[in-house]
Amino acid sequence: MIFFTITQQFAGRLPSLAAISDGATTGKMMSLVTELEHLADTLARDANSAPPVSLATVAERIAKNQGVKPGEVAILGLSLRWRHLYFLVPEALKHVGHIPLTSNSALAARTARESRPEINNAFASVKHATVFEGVKTGAEAAEAIQKIISAPILVGEKVVGVIQISRKGPSTKDAGPDFTPGDLGKVLALCKPLGRLLQHLASE
């Protein structure tokens, strides 16, 4: 298992941003960062004049750039009032339930509490909450999460949500390649613009 802390490993070390375009390469992933930042800027200036923003579409773009299926990207908002995390995407999980911040079995709760990103390429073998894995989130049948990246979505140093990228399948081998520190770096690059978007789009 590989652990990282944002402040020591990644602060101030993200690559420069490229022009907006689609694609699955690292450079084009950074273009997605630029696009999300532009949307956040537009919403900050005037939410009424901003183009419609769908977090489901954002998640699909993230999935494409990370080389995973749309149902393997989860974005959760944080409710300070109710002290829980709630699903924003996938859509199918919105009404399934919440994740208490006090949960000792939920990786997302630990990510939010500790504000620490994490990679686990043996996730299925670790004791964790599995209720959400049993819900079908797309055309594919529900499968167990075998590998996962979990990272806090931030506004400044404040955690406002959690993003998780997973690889699902009947076995670790079937799920695909291990996540790497490079994959985590791509996810962390998205956390700041996602935080700004959640400020405007997520409601408790």
Image (cartoon, helix red, strand yellow):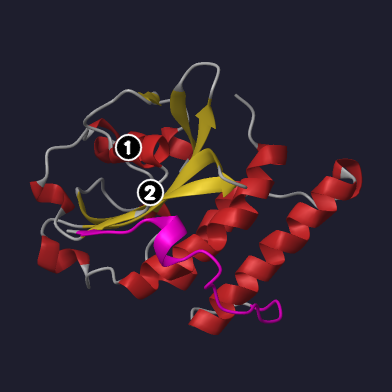
Of the pair 190 and 96, the residue shown nearer to us: 190
Label 1: element kind = helix
Q: Is residue 120 left or right of residue 122?
A: right
Q: Residue at x 53, y 25 (%)?
A: 79
Instruction: Relative to 159, say whether 40 is above or below.
Output: below
Residue 75 appears in the rendering? no
Q: Residue at x 46, y 63 (%)?
A: 187
Instruction: Relative to 173, say whether 94 is above or below.
Output: above
Give the amino acid at mark 2.
Arg
Give the amino acid at mark 1.
Arg
* Quarter of image, res 179: bottom left
Residue that badge 1 annotates: 110
Position of the N terminus by quadrant: bottom left
Q: Residue at x 71, y 81 (%)?
A: 19
Which range of residues does the magenta coloring cover? 2-21
Instruction: Relative to 188, say whether 111 is above or below.
Output: above
Give the percent coordinates (x, y) of residue 43. 81, 48
Residue that badge 2 annotates: 116
* Quarter of image, res 185: bottom left
Give the percent coordinates (x, y) of residue 98. 40, 24
Residue 109 appears in the rendering? yes
Label 2: element kind = loop
Please tell me whether residue 68 belongs to the stretch shown in magenta: no
Confirm or deny contact between disc 1 and disc 2 (CB under 8 A).
yes
How dense is the environment of label 2, judged by Cα within 10 Å: few (below 14), some, or many (20 and up)?
Answer: some
Please tell me whether residue 9 belongs to the stretch shown in magenta: yes
